[in-house]
Image (cartoon, rainbow, N blue to C red):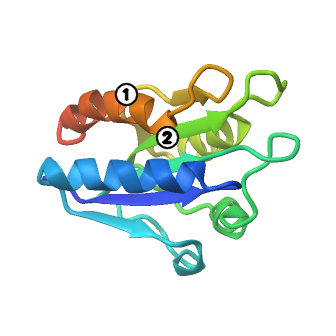
Amino acid sequence: MRKVNLIFGTVYGNAQFVAETLRDDLQKLGREVQLFQSDELSSFIPPQDETLLIVSSTTGQGDVPDEILPWFEMLKSQAPYLPNLRYGVVALGDSSYDTFCQAGIQFDELLTELGAHRIGRLLKIDACETMEPEVSAKAWLQIWNTQIDIETS
């Protein structure tokens, strides 16, 4: 079973709570999971033999949260080629804004540019419709988890 590296970017704590919930669920499913704090990301390049899961809220005008922006910018500037990395994204946002879930979308686009392959669909959770984002994320995780170890060609 592939290890999951879990990274979150939060503004008000929702993305962190969702990430912690997903970590707990993945561990219950028998996965090894490492939940990274923002201060552990300065030079982190995701290992390609492990899986990356990003949970991010959106701030400002569709921006990546400040706590993980330096990591996002580092990946963007160093542009490591990651053709064997498989990843997932859970994006939290508010559909009343034009920039709905834009931070998660930016992570998805960056990882695709770096050659990585997304597992399943990008999950967008709308704060206007969902009072408990972890419930939607847990349902999505059940499908996502079954796809982690499926090799792509």
Mark nearer the N terminus (1 vs 2) = 2
The disc placed on residue 120 is: 1
Image point (53%, 56%), residue name: 16
The answer to whether residue 65 is above or below residue 150 is below
Q: Amino acid at mark 2?
A: Val
Q: Label 1 crowding class (10 Å Cα cut-off): few <14, some 14-19, many 20+?
A: some
The disc placed on residue 89 is: 2
The answer to whether residue 34 is above or below residue 96 is below
Q: Label 2 crowding class (10 Å Cα cut-off): few <14, some 14-19, many 20+?
A: many
Image point (72%, 36%), residue name: 102
Farthest residue toward the right? 61
**Residue 135 placed where, x, y %?**
40, 32
Residue 141 left/right relative to 147: right
Q: Amino acid at mark 1?
A: Gly
How far apart marks 1 and 2 lie (CA) works out to 9 Å
The answer to whether residue 72 is above or below residue 91 is below
Whether residue 153 is visible here, answered yes or no, is no
**Numbered disc 1: secondary structure:** loop
Q: Quadrant of residue 31?
A: bottom left
